[in-house]
Image: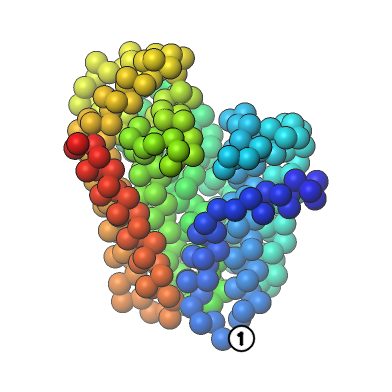
Amino acid sequence: MAGPARATLASGGKRTRPRMVLACAGPAPGRAHGVVAAAAAVELMHMATLVHDDVIDGAPLRRGRPSVVGAHGRGRAVAVGDVLMAAAFREAARLCDPAAVRVLARATDELTRGELLQAAGRGDVGLGEEIYVERCLLKTGALLAAACHLGALAGGAPPEARRRLAAFGRHLGVAYQIVDDVLDLTGDAAVTGKPRGADLADGTMTLPVILALRLDPWLGPAVRAAAGDAGVRARLCDELAAHAGTRAAAERAAEHADAAHAALDDLAHDADAAALRALASRVLARADAVAVRAVA
């Protein structure tokens, strides 16, 4: 198991979550050991979820390279994901604070519930915006919130600061997921790293599709057909990319990014707020870019 697990950890990525841990911890004099352990715990958990996601999706590639399931099969991939998850909890325990393990356990529970919620809503053209946002909070927001909470905890932040930093992570996660879902319709596969319309192909209902269906219910049959017909999917991507529902989705992302910024105002903890605000601003910039693309 060690080889595939090490390869997964070495596969790259932006390491956003560990960076969030470090930023939320702040200077943390005398606490470096716990901060590093918290950052490692979050990244290990993130990698475990990626391995398990690829098993669920049957994805042969991850970031352009063979995924664990693609290279080693389903059984070994499940085990590798489990090993990474166990390692995440081992690192969280190094903080010697039961609260750290509780934070990571809650995030793991929420990630699992988010995956089940997504599976339950697959192909449901009547899915509402509220369920979608809940799914984003669970699948994407939960681990970002845990990164911020663990960083603040490791850095000695007071409870109210920990709560607000976790709220920053949740809002940032929702904003990021909405933008990612918009880019599934408007983006270039060479940039996004996945085929255009991948969510339509597997029947995942995303916010731009939900809002477009609310405005134009007659799109429902095309959304259903897009899962099994590449031609319908390509035409629908073109139509949805310019649709008012997609512009509205980008605006929702901007609202959540603004809420993330607001969570950092007058924070009673010496976190690196500038680094955190830069992350939220990048999501805002992506939201603005996709909104402009949708108008065009």
Residue in view at x 51 percent, y 82 percent? 27
Which quarter of the rendered picture does the C terminus lie within? top left
Residue 221 is situated, as x and y percent measured from the top left of the image, at 33, 13
Is 10 on the left or on the right of 217, as rendered?
A: right
Which residue is more in the foreground, 259 or 192? 192
Category of crowding for the residue at label 1, using alpha-carbon neighbours closer than 10 angstroms: few (below 14), some (14–19), many (at least 20): few
* Count of residue discs: 1
Tell me, what colour scheme is on the image?
rainbow
Q: Is residue 166 visible?
A: yes
In the displayed structure, would residue 71 be above or below residue 292?
Answer: above
Which residue is more in the foreground, 105 or 24? 24
In the displayed structure, would residue 71 be above or below residue 270?
Answer: above
Residue in view at x 26 percent, y 35 percent? 246
Which residue is label 1 attached to?
A: 30
In the displayed structure, would residue 121 be above or below residue 229?
Answer: below
Q: Amino acid at mark 1?
A: Gly
SS for dot 1: loop
Is 15 on the left or on the right of 41, as rendered?
A: left
Which residue is more in the foreground, 114 or 5? 5
Residue 178 is situated, as x and y percent measured from the top left of the image, at 36, 43
